[in-house]
Amino acid sequence: MKKQFNKMAGILVCIFFGFVLLFIMNRIDYIWGAISTFLGVLTPFVYAFGIAYILNFPFRFFEKKVFSKIKAKWFQKVNRPLSLALTYLLFFGLLAFFVSILIPQLFENISKLVTNIPSYIKTLKEGFNAFQTWVAERFSIDISFFNGMNNGLADMIKSLADLGNLSNVYGAAVSTAGFFYNWVMAFIISIYMLGSKEFLFKQLKKLGAAFLPTKWMPTIYEIINVSDDKCGKFLVGKVLDSTIIGIMVFICMSILQLPYTPLISVIVAICNLVPFFGPFIGGIPSAFLLFMISPLYSLEFIVMIFVIQQIDGNIIGPKVVGSQVGLIGFWSLFSVLVFGGIFGITGMILGTPIFAAIYTLVGRKTKSRISMKGENAENVIKMDVVKSRNVTNIKAKVSISPRIKNHITADVDDKAEADNSAEDE
């Protein structure tokens, strides 16, 4: 009787969960909308964490390196508030300096670009028409490909003509207002995060100790420490490196008297945050924009950006960003492509340090496991997979089952006989 009751209860539970899943599937749009709204509310806190994380480096410098040398008790009481105030004063001072110089020029450049781009594209279209006519007359080949490009340019011109649409302007204004609200609130929240970071960390540690198995905590702390070491230094160094590159591009373009200097400098600096593909993401559209004005401008820009990137890759980058990521070129490219494909631009920027942290943790675990297995694991690592003859020299040192050992021996003997036959012939 009890077995039948338990069986019936299990069936009822399965039916109940089936109805719950059907309800969720039928209301997935509403549920996803609610989740998106909740995540949208948390957006300022995510931004605030990023701001506090980056500003923690100068804050720690002021608190631990500069003001800690003053031993007066009354001063130590104001050490943290003073360090916090100086950190944000330094940050907002630099921000105001760049904004006061760049923003007016950026607005001027963008306004000029929006006004002139239809004429630029029209000129480019006329050039394509002349080029395709020359190709058709000279080589007598099909030019339908160029017709498709002309249609694309016509659609682009039509889209640019709709920039002044009222609904687009209204949507842009709403998005801009939301953008500024999130960032203003993020800066305010970041002050509280940075000022009370030890208290917040202690609360998180208490939650972990209360609700997670105690044996997990050392591993969690190790993951946090490695992630902080890889991500923190990389991000701060990359921001500084991109700022230097932006300033160099601005100076060089000003000397060459190229148009849209402030706009292109900002684009190149921001795109330089992306490893590997950053120079291409920022350089190709900028070169195309200058090409629409004058091919000579585009050529000068390409040569200039190539020289700057060589200086960055060989001198500035290693000095500023350093080699703390610890990845070879293949894994760096892998991390950028994979994380970028999943998370977009954010994944491309953060993919390298995140993967570097994963790479380090997996490497430590691998080394520990190999050490636990002892000499057998070391001998297996030394085995040459391609040249099977080496197995005969090492297989005796490795403890393996008799069935596998006989299989390896047979393979090696067959290989040796084939080699001997080839030598005799």
Image (cartoon, rainbow, N blue to C red):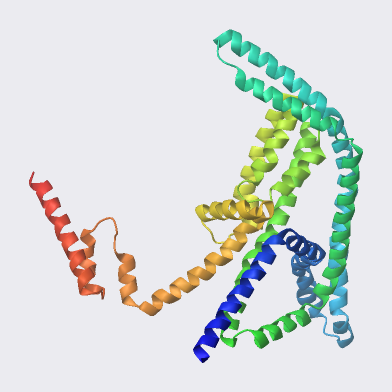
Q: Residue at (64%, 56%) from the top-left corner?
A: 319
Q: Residue at (61%, 22%) from the top-left corner?
A: 145
Q: Quadrant of residue 77?
A: bottom right
Residue 324 in sight in this render: no
- In this rendered view, identify the residue nearer to me: 86 or 394: 394
Q: In the picture shown, does residue 280 fall above or below 415?
A: above
* Residue 144 in the figure: left or right of residue 282: left
Q: Quadrant of residue 19?
A: bottom right
Residue 237 in sight in this render: yes
Q: In the picture shown, does residue 166 fall above or below 217?
A: above
Image x and y of residue 193, in percent: 81, 73
* Residue farthest along the left direction in this orientation: 424
- In this rendered view, identify the residue nearer to me: 112 or 156: 156
Image quadrant for the C terminus? top left
Q: Residue at (17%, 65%) from the top-left corner?
A: 409
* Residue farthest along the top direction in this orientation: 137
Image x and y of residue 232, in percent: 68, 65
Q: Quadrant of residue 290?
A: top right
- In this rendered view, identify the residue nearer to me: 121 or 291: 121
